[in-house]
Image (tube, rainbow, N blue to C red):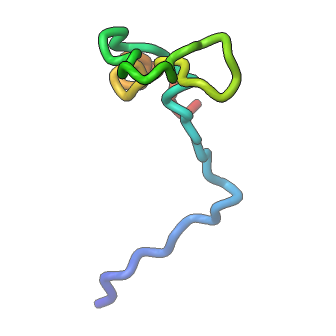
Amino acid sequence: MSLQVASPEWQDQIIYLVLADRFFDGDPGNNDQGVGEYAPGVDGHYSGGDLKGVTQNLDYIQTP
C-alpha cells in the first residue's frame, strides 16, 4: 500500500502571492516604527499593510 498521493498538475492550480504591505492595513497602530519608513504614497516606503489586514479579507482571497 502506497502512502504517496499523486499531485495535481501545477498548471491547473490557483496560486496567490499576497504582498501584505500593499494589500490592506489591518492594524494602523503598527505602521510607523519610528524610523521614517512609513509613507504610503512614496515608492520604496512601507504602505502599512499587515497579516491582520490579510486575515480580515480572506473572503476576497478565495478560490472560485
Residue 19, can we see it? yes
As drawn, 4 above or below 14: below
User: On the rendered structure, is 40 left or right of 1?
Assistant: right
Image quadrant where one finds the C terminus: top right
Q: Quadrant of residue 11?
A: bottom right
Residue 43: x %, y % from top left: 70, 23
Residue 4: x %, y % from top left: 37, 81
Residue 44: x %, y % from top left: 66, 29
Residue 34: x %, y % from top left: 37, 19
> Looking at the image, which residue is at 51% across and 23% down?
37
Q: Nearer the viewer, residue 44 or 36?
A: 36
Q: How many marks?
A: 0
> Looking at the image, which residue is at 30% across and 82% down?
3
Residue 58, can we see it? no
Q: Quadrant of residue 47?
A: top right
Q: Quadrant of residue 26?
A: top left
Image quadrant where one finds the N terminus: bottom left
Q: Nearer the viewer, residue 46 or 12?
A: 46
Give the residue at the far front of this rendering: 35
> Looking at the image, which residue is at 54% across and 35% down?
18
As drawn, 9 above or below 31: below
As drawn, 3 above or below 58: below
User: On the rendered structure, is 33 left or right of 37?
Assistant: left
> Looking at the image, which residue is at 30% across and 10% down?
29
